[in-house]
Amino acid sequence: MKTYRLLLVIAMLVFTSAVASLASPMTGTWKLNESKSKFSPGATKNQTVTYTAAKGDMTKVAVDGINKDGERVHWTMTVKFDGKPYKVTGTPLFDSVTYQPVNERSNKLTLMKDGKVVVTGTVKVSKDDKSRVVKTTMTDATGKKQTDTAYYDKM
């Protein structure tokens, strides 16, 4: 009987964790609203970004876009929103990411390459969960800071 109760408690914790991660305002697929967005010259435009529940309390993020040469890009990561670095695969521009929660609807974002910060930014979901704004800043090859503001609508 004790084993049954323990298994029931564990099952409930796993289910609650999965439901909690799905209830996050970030969860779902976000489509770029290019008419509202502002990009620096040569910026990669992430057309869609999808957040789905992964094992444990992790979240899988898949990004599909178009780079400055018009080529398709796809990169992924499995993260927690806890401020710790997680591996990014599929892009030569950065190899790890951190999402530091600010509140329920926003996170600070840091992208790194070989331990060096290359992009910082914020991700903010609207109160109605239908849109979000991603504002990022990076330094280009000439040392000039560039800021992009991307608006997304939830699909």
Image (cartoon, rainbow, N blue to C red):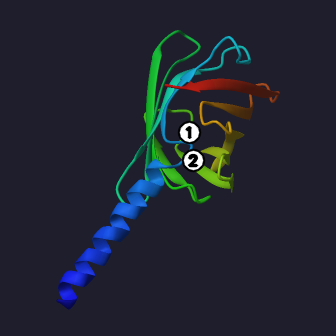
Question: Which is in the foreground here, disc 2 or disc 1?
Answer: 2
The spot of residue 70 in percent (x, y) is 52, 9
Kind of residue indicated by mark 2: Val
Left or right: 99, with 108 as reference point: left
Specify whether 54 is left or right of 149.
left
> Is 130 left, or right, of 117 in this rendering?
left
120 versus 16 height, above or below: above
Q: Residue at x 58, y 24 (%)?
A: 153
30 shown above or below 11? above
Q: Which mark is residue 97?
A: 2
Q: Are marks 2 and 1 in contact (CB under 8 Å)?
A: yes
* Pointer 1 residue: 94
Q: Residues within 10 Å of mark 1 (few under 14, many from 20)?
A: many
**Mark 2, other Cα within 10 Å: few <14 / some 14–19 / many ≥20:** many
**For the residues marked 2 and 1, what is the alpha-carbon distance in whole angstroms?**
8 Å
Is 87 positioned to the left or the right of 1 in the image? right
